[in-house]
Amino acid sequence: MKPPRVSVITPTYNRAHLLPRAWNSLRRQTLADFQWIVVDDGSSDDTRAVVAGFADPRIRYVYQDNQGCNIARNRGEQEVEADFVTFLDSDDELYAADTLNMMLNTLSAARPEIGMAYFTVVDGEGRQGFHVMQGDEMETTYLDHLCRQKIRGEFMPIFRRETLALTPWPLYNGMEVLRHWRLLRHYQALVVRKPARIYHHKAGDNLTGAMSAIQRAGAMSEANLELIAEHRHAWLQHCPCELGRQLFYAAMYQALDGQTLNALKSAQAAFPVANWPIRKSILTLLVSLAVPAPLRKRLFLLRARGWGA
């Protein structure tokens, strides 16, 4: 049989109630020639039955023991049949009926040196507050992304299949930027100001939530240190303040994980190279290190919630 034109990978864990929304956004696509790979990361709800109920030959369901979303994404890539690959989380949906067609046509028409294309993200209310970019369509490099000079924020990518073969997703629950920047050392990217994904940040269990940040603090501090080790030289050479930002993030996660001494060391290393806004955050963090870790976590949650506002 002729392979599909694009493979869409969705890792999911106990989100059976959200999968119909993601599937509805896929089945209404004007580009019907796609493959949907659903990787069930050890769910204890009725995810299997829900996916089976969709009863569509374009769907490939894969079950694995619970190992985290990035390992699930890597598992999904083993099932890819198309030359182009994108990722859709189970709590999100595609923006419009022509989204897959628009993404595929954009990347397939680009130069071979362009290994991936990034598109903007809107929230459930239609707001586009997740990104900053200088133009409506740009070719970007590793340094553009590393130094956040032309682009920063949340985007939805589509990849050439051969691009993804260079390196897998990191073995952390999150920190996808590790893979993106590794790929950008070998390929350029195309960044387009066209919405492709609706991010439902009120789903209740997003990886980006404050409680999730606390639960994943230990792993995220390790991931930040790995990121820093890989890109420290480039930051120091081209944009030192970004090194300060990442060192601050490492310090924050270490503080939330109860690693008080390590957090102090990371904060001290961050201060000389950080810009003033990050320096103010570092000073706040240093004050928080004087209180016990449980209270530290509570203060973090209060601040994330606007102090109860």
Image: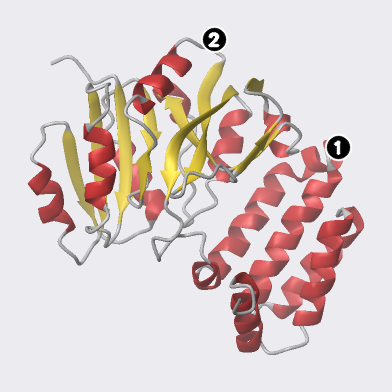
The residue nearer to you, when weighing 164 against 12, is 12
Q: In this view, does 222 lie above or below 158?
A: below
The residue that disc 2 covers is 111
From the top left corner, tell me how far across and down residue 27 is, in percent: 21, 33
User: According to the image, what is the colour scheme of the structure?
Assistant: secondary structure
The amino acid marked with disc number 1 is: Gln
From the top left corner, tell me how far across and down residue 84 is, in percent: 37, 23
Circle 2 or circle 1, nearest the eye: 2
The residue nearer to you, when weighing 37 against 19, is 19
The residue nearer to you, when weighing 153 against 169, is 153
The amino acid marked with disc number 2 is: Arg
Q: In this view, does 50 lie to the left or right of 242?
A: left
In percent of the image, x 55 and y 72: which residue is there? 214
Q: In this view, does 104 lie to the left or right of 257?
A: left
Q: How crowded is mark 1: few (under 14 residues within 10 Å), some or many (20 or more)?
A: few
From the top left corner, tell me how far across and down residue 42 is, in percent: 25, 61
Quarter of the image that includes the N terminus: top left
The residue that disc 1 covers is 237
In percent of the image, x 63 and y 23: which residue is there? 136
Q: Is residue 171 above or below residue 289?
A: above
Q: Give SS at disc 2.
A: loop
Quadrant of res 204: bottom left
Q: Is residue 140 left or right of residue 95?
A: right
Quarter of the image that includes the C terminus: bottom right
Q: How crowded is mark 2: few (under 14 residues within 10 Å), some or many (20 or more)?
A: few
Q: In this view, does 184 lie to the left or right of 51?
A: right
